Amino acid sequence: MKVTVRLFAALREQLGASSLEVEVGDGSTVADVVDRLADRHAGLREHRFATALNQRYADASAAVGDGDEVALIPPVSGG
Amino acid sequence: MDATDRYSRQILYPEIGPDGQRRLGAARVAVVGLGALGCPAAALLARAGVGRLDVVDRDLVERSNLQRQTLYTDADAAAGRPKAEAAARALSEANPDVEIVPHLRDLSAADADAVLDGADAIVDGTDNFDVRFLLNDWAVKHDVPWVYAAAVGASGLTMPVIPGRTACLRCLFEEPPPAGSAETCDTAGVLGPVTTVVGALAALETLKLLAGREDAVRRGLLQLDLWHNDLRPVAVEGPREGCPCCGRREFPFLARGRGGTASSLCGRDAVSVRPAGDGAFDLAATRDRLQRAYRVVDVGSILRFDVDGLRVTLFADGRAIVHGTTDEARARAVYARTVGS
């Protein structure tokens, strides 16, 4: 199934896109989606971020479904 | 109500009304950090007529601040005035009816009680996670709402925290990111309209809280990437089960002894150094000693002297800003060698 990953701030710059499509198997979780993306973009593993599923905060163990949207939320520090 | 009254347009807005305005006038709010977020937030809260505004900052005004830190003037930068002092003056000129209390401090676990006790809400205008995690622990422990706000480049992130009812910062980010891991204004730059938008959003949520309208406060995060016209709300349910802070009520960032730190200042070629001891610091005695070796400029509340091409500004609480380097170890070394730590 297909999941859309939305990127933000430093992650958007690093991966060069505001959203990417990821293909994962049935029964996958948010963590699986992130892992699959990190297989393609190793730099992702250097970052810490919170995650959201369909615009709601969700932890890494949340189950994803076909067509879902996972957003990565890196902490922002400046000010 | 007289239409010429200072607050008439705000009172006309029915969600505030006369009752909300009365509550604002009786409220006390602390703005911690008076950079590009704290400037607009403090200005809007002062103009809105909060009763008392405590403004806290450890830094001095510099020319590179003026592009986005809207409370300061060219003259403030030329004189190198402490931000808390310059901000207090600008805020009093904007609204003399508000009690403005400046704090020239690097907020730490040791002095958080002294600065924050009595606050009805706290606004995050800081540029680092050390202080944000301290604010989060303090606010949750003392049941005081605070608003997380941050911006870098053209991106921002903000979330109101109402202890026990909304998620807290540690529900989202359990530990501060490792030093050097997040973008800073030094490495990524920052745009004035972006910080002003994020600071204004933080002020707005604070007004709702102070006006007694917790029901209207945003529940969750707002991510902004304003160069790309991208605004995304992320709903966050109540406190996360198992959160060490609002769940287990552990407050490690309030433990003393996390001092003795040096941290480079966002957007500046300078390092802030704080000695580990939290005993009383004697500025006059230190001046007398330093004068044997250095040409010391005494500006009353601060001392300034040059060493090895670096300029050291020393505050009455023993904290120093070392200008001319971003190397924290070098700054600590200069501090130890000149002031002593």
Image (cartoon, rainbow, N blue to C red):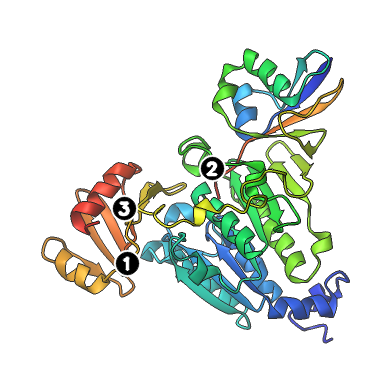
Residue B127 in the image, given as x and y percentages of width and height: 52, 50
Q: Amino acid at mark 2?
A: Pro
Q: Secondary structure at mark 3?
A: strand
Q: Secondary structure at mark 2?
A: loop
Cβ atoms at labels 2 and 1 below 8 Å apart: no
Please give the count of numbered marks on the rendered protein: 3
Nearest to the observer: residue B74 or residue B305:
B305
**Disc 2 crowd, CA 10 A, few/some/many (<14, 14-19, 20+):** some
**Disc 1 crowd, CA 10 A, few/some/many (<14, 14-19, 20+):** few
Q: Amino acid at mark 1?
A: Gly
Q: CA distance from mark 1 to mark 3?
A: 21 Å
Nearest to the observer: residue B279 or residue B247:
B247
Q: Amino acid at mark 3?
A: Val
Q: State whether residue A14 is above or below residue B270.
A: above
Residue linked to disc 3: B322
Cβ atoms at labels 2 and 3 below 8 Å apart: no
Does any portion of residue B40 appear in the rendered image?
no
Q: CA distance from mark 2 to mark 1?
A: 27 Å
- The image quadrant of residue B136 is bottom right
**Disc 3 crowd, CA 10 A, few/some/many (<14, 14-19, 20+):** many
Q: Chain of mark 3?
A: B
Residue B288 in the image, given as x and y percentages of width and height: 16, 71
Q: Nearer the viewer, mark 2 or mark 3?
A: 2
Q: Which badge, 2 or 3, comes first in the chain's sequence?
A: 2
Q: Chain of mark 2?
A: B
**Number of the label disc, if any, that sits on residue B176:** 2
Q: Is residue A61 left or right of residue B341?
A: right
Q: Is residue B285 left or right of residue A76?
A: left
Q: Chain of mark 1?
A: B
Q: Which badge, 1 or 3, comes first in the chain's sequence?
A: 1
